[in-house]
Image (cartoon, helix red, strand yellow):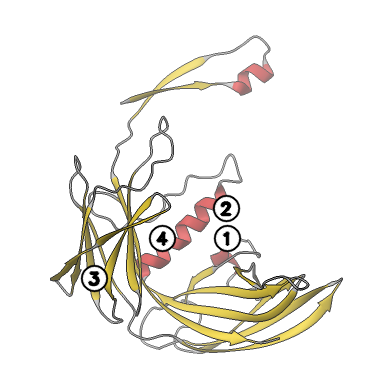
Amino acid sequence: MKRIYLLLTLCAVAFPGCIKYISLDVEHEVKPVLNALMYRDSILTAEVSISMTPNTAMPGLRSDAVVKLYENGTFLETLAKNEHEGKTRYVSSRPLKGGTHYRITAEVPGYPMVEGEDVIPGQVIDFTAELENRPANGANDYFIQLKLNDPPAQRNYYRVRLYSLTQYSNSTPWRRLSNITYLGPELEDLFFGESNLFQYVFDDAMFGGRIRQLPFKTREWYRVIKFELEVSEITRDTYLFMQSAELQRSKNHHAFAEKVTVHNNIRNGLGLVGGIAIGWKELIP
């Protein structure tokens, strides 16, 4: 049980000389945190840490965990430790398969075993995209028309991101994640009223089973060699995690905003084990 003291600054401002301390008992349960995004046809990478309390610094990744992977209910392997720049991650020896159920367990000394599970989507989503360039005040505005072929008879969840390979003068080209702006009105509420994000996460509740056009825009000040449009099919747990994490981030800018709890699918702990199948399209200006 931790004891936290809150200073009533409002009272101090309204009535000079009035400073009051209130003692509150707040319980903080420390739990293991397991995070793993499972990509179709890719090696699995998992991270294990311990949740924070108000009196602790940002915890590092744990190097003493035992992490195991199960495929369709059958034990597959104990993940190997991978040390890089002082951080430990746990990796599989083989790529994961689409349309397959995976469960990950993590044992950290002194804590109950934690576990999470999900299915990797079986197919990469069918989509096309067109690119248009319009000069704008010394920069270039690039308009992208994404046409999404949404499968019928099921709820589908998506993430859209845009990478750009840019070059300034004769420097070495660099690849980075670009800010994109959604230009359509119908999905605005799903993006929390924000129009300039690094990723858009949404479901097909308003266009299920149909071909849907989604317009986006990005602005670049340097020469663009190419764009890589990433459209991923994600699972419900992955969608809820990403959506709630983005909502929490947006609410942090408002002091009196309602608290947002980030979605969690880890038993006995915190974090996410989520499935994702990535589709790519190159767009050349």
Q: Amino acid at mark 2?
A: Ser
Rendered view: 111 above or below 74:
above
In whole angstroms, how far apart are the C-alphas of marks 1 and 3? 31 Å
Of labels 3 and 4, earlier in sequence is: 3
In whole angstroms, how far apart are the C-alphas of marks 2 and 4? 14 Å
Of labels 1 and 4, earlier in sequence is: 1
Q: Which residue is labeled 1 in the image?
A: 192
Q: Which residue is labeled 4 in the image?
A: 241
In whole angstroms, how far apart are the C-alphas of marks 2 and 1? 8 Å
Q: Quadrant of the C terminus?
A: bottom right
Toward the top, the furthest residue is: 17
Q: Is residue 214 left or right of residue 134?
A: left
In the rendered image, residue 57, in percent from the top left (x then y), is placed at: 43, 35
Determine if residue 186 is in view: no
Determine if residue 38 is in view: yes
Q: Amino acid at mark 4?
A: Phe
Q: Amino acid at mark 3?
A: Tyr
Element on which disc 1 rests: loop
- Identify which residue is drawn at 42% across, 49% down: 261
> Which mark is in front, 3 or 2?
3
Q: Quadrant of the N terminus?
A: top left
Q: Are marks 2 and 1 in contact (CB under 8 Å)?
A: yes
Q: Are marks 2 and 4 in contact (CB under 8 Å)?
A: no
Q: Which residue is labeled 3 in the image?
A: 102
Rendered view: 271 above or below 152:
above
Rendered image: mark on residue 250: 2
Q: Is residue 130 left or right of residue 120?
A: right
Q: Are marks 3 and 4 in contact (CB under 8 Å)?
A: no
